[in-house]
Image: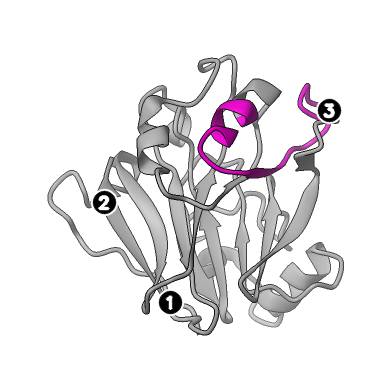
Amino acid sequence: RMVAGCPRTGARGSRLAQGLVYIEAMEAGRMRVGLISDTHSPAMGVHPPEEVRRAFVGVDLILHAGDIYSSECLDWLEEIAPVVGVEVPPAPVIGDPRVVEKRVVEIEGYAIGLVHDLGMHGIDEVRPGAFARSWPSHLSIADSLASFFDGRRLDGVVFGHSHWEMAETHEGVLFVNPGSPTLPHQTRRLGTRSEEHTSELQSHHDLVCRLL
């Protein structure tokens, strides 16, 4: 069972677009995964902001959920940890062996989907609250997600595109959009990235917000 929450950490810390979002196992996790999306390099800078490097100290793997554009961005992230990415073709980064259009990553027993633009039935763009507002009650969210990922049942999915940070649990599946570190909510300022902590035996998670 996975849950999402966001306790306040002060006036600025309560605002996700100004903070660090990460998923942490309730018990000590064995692996820490950094989540990032929508870096838009080099238009928004040759590489992500230096705050990303500081936030990702100690991560074991980085998942980039797209709008990467340049391999130089991945090279910079790979100085921190191995990188797995996705991108929507055509884009200059297509052809880089670290990037495919969508994938499922197995992390300590969890199946995590990774895609840039998450297409779900009847929802034009997945943003916070979209499932509660727009999802047809007669359809299963988990089944529709599995169909989108070619029949794979998932424990969670990481996606981008909207530039809106999000962490919600629906039908036992954790949906995470880390937002954008360069264009949060489509505005040019410092934004968000995430760290996901996993545990081999523990599937109960909290979402915690911390300042950059």
| Lower sequence index among marks 3 and 1 | 1
What is the quadrant of the C terminus in the image?
Answer: top left
Q: Amino acid at mark 1?
A: Val
> What separation in Å lies between label 3 and label 1 (alpha carbons)?
36 Å
Give residue 210's mark: 2
Circle 2 or circle 1, nearest the eye: 2
| Lower sequence index among marks 2 and 1 | 1
Q: How is the image coloured?
A: one colour
Residue 150 in which image quadrant: bottom right
Establish if 161 lies above or below 186: below
Establish if 175 lies above or below 16: below
Q: Amino acid at mark 3?
A: Pro
- Using a 10 Å C-alpha cutoff, classify the residue at mark 1 as few (fewer than 14 neighbours), some (14 to 19) or many (20 or more): some
Q: Position of residue 24 (x, y in %)?
A: 40, 67
Which residues make up the magenta segment?
74-94
Circle 3 sits on which residue? 90
Q: Residue at 52% across / 48% down in the picture?
A: 35
Q: Amino acid at mark 2?
A: Arg
> What separation in Å lies between label 2 and label 1 (alpha carbons)?
18 Å
Does the magenta run of residues contain 88?
yes
Give residue 3's mark: 1
Circle 3 or circle 2, nearest the eye: 2
Q: Nearer the viewer, residue 84 or 132?
A: 84
| Lower sequence index among marks 3 and 2 | 3
Judging from the image, what secondary structure is the residue with disc 1 in? loop
Q: Position of residue 140 (x, y in %)?
A: 70, 80
Contact flag, marks 2 and 1 (Cβ < 8 Å)? no
Q: Nearer the viewer, residue 37 or 144?
A: 37
Q: How many marks can you see?
A: 3
Outermost residue toward the left in this view: 10
